[in-house]
Image (spheres, rainbow, N blue to C red):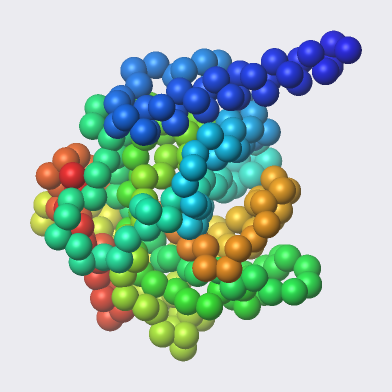
């Protein structure tokens, strides 16, 4: 009986925290303090994220995958985290409209490869090479990471997970030709804010790369009871780092000969 009561309390806390984040995201208002007892393990963090998804009447159009750095990766038993991206926040790059972020909260831009899921029959992919068969399109892009809670990243990965994985939307740039998929690690990626380069790297620094991120996401979602949907976009991880932006920031992500993506933060 004690275990059942404790489980009910945990679920109630998750719903209360999720409700606070959903309300803040709906209104655009910032949150000055974490709205409850912050989660300290992955199960509690994803319970809050799942509760938030249950409250929304919005279609999920994809997922962001982020990295959990040492030593927290060993402590938590995972080196990546995931969060939802809603369909109405997944946009084609090139729009003149500023991309909105939460004023008074946290906001950052990340250069990433975007991969579109094409689920296959049979077991989930266990390697990046197997995950490649579960993807039917790759694009260059930018993830806009933003939360009403300014300390979303500073408070650690479990807090990041709990508020939608700190995602506010995805920008989809030009298509990467299929012949280039095996050579993504060779693409030098840059990110500039207001004309100043703030990051430069390749996916060779990103664990097992973008397709490894897909394999991780599929396993995560399956454990959580989600049916994998074709057409979901996977924002596969920050290549040059997480770069703080503010309303008015002009962001340009360069992917060498593959092209570039740019946006204005609103």
Quarter placement of the N terminus: top right
Residue in front for this viewpoint, 259 or 137 = 137
Q: Is residue 44 above or below residue 211?
A: above
Q: In which quarter of the image is residue 6?
A: top right
**Drawn side of residue 104 relative to residue 126, left or right:** left
Q: Can residue 82 be seen in this view?
A: yes
Q: Residue at x 83, y 18 (%)?
A: 4
Q: Quadrant of residue 172?
A: bottom left
Q: Residue at x 26, y 65 (%)?
A: 93
Farthest top residue? Answer: 2
Rendered location of residue 223, percent (x, y): 73, 48
Farthest front residue? Answer: 57
Q: Residue at x 44, y 19 (%)?
A: 34
Q: Is residue 264 above or below residue 6?
A: below
Quarter placement of the C terminus: top left
Rendered location of residue 169, percent (x, y): 36, 51
**Image label count:** 0
Q: Is residue 232 above or below residue 180?
A: above
Rendered location of residue 189, percent (x, y): 32, 66
Q: Residue at x 70, y 68 (%)?
A: 125
Residue in front for this viewpoint, 11 or 80 = 11
Rendered location of residue 86, percent (x, y): 44, 50
Q: Is residue 237 visible?
A: no
Farthest bottom residue? Answer: 179
């Amino acid at each position: 009986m004690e275990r059942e009561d404790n489980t009910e309390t945990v679920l109630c806390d998750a719903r209360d925290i999720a409700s606070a984040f959903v309300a803040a995201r709906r209104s655009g208002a910032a949150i000055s303090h974490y709205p409850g007892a912050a989660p300290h393990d992955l199960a509690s963090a994803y319970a809050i994220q799942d509760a938030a998804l249950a409250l929304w009447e919005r279609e999920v159009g994809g997922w962001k995958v982020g990295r959990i750095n040492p030593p927290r990766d060993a402590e938590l038993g995972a080196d990546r985290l995931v969060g939802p991206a809603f369909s109405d926040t997944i946009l084609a790059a090139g729009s003149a409209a500023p991309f909105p972020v939460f004023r008074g909260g946290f906001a950052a831009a990340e250069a990433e490869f975007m991969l579109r899921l094409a689920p296959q029959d049979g077991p989930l992919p266990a390697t990046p090479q197997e995950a490649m068969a579960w993807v039917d399109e790759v694009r260059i892009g930018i993830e806009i990471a933003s939360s009403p809670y300014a300390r979303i990243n500073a408070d650690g990965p479990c807090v990041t997970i709990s508020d939608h994985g700190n995602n506010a939307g995805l920008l989809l740039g030009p298509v990467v030709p299929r012949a280039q998929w095996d050579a993504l690690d060779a693409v030098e990626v840059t990110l500039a804010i207001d004309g100043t380069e703030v990051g430069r790297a390749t996916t060779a620094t990103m664990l097992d790369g973008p397709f490894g991120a897909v394999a991780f996401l599929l396993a995560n979602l399956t454990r959580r009871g989600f049916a994998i949907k074709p057409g979901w976009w996977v924002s596969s991880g920050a290549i040059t780092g997480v770069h703080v932006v503010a309303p008015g920031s002009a962001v340009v992500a360069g992917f060498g000969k593959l092209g570039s993506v740019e946006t204005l933060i609103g």
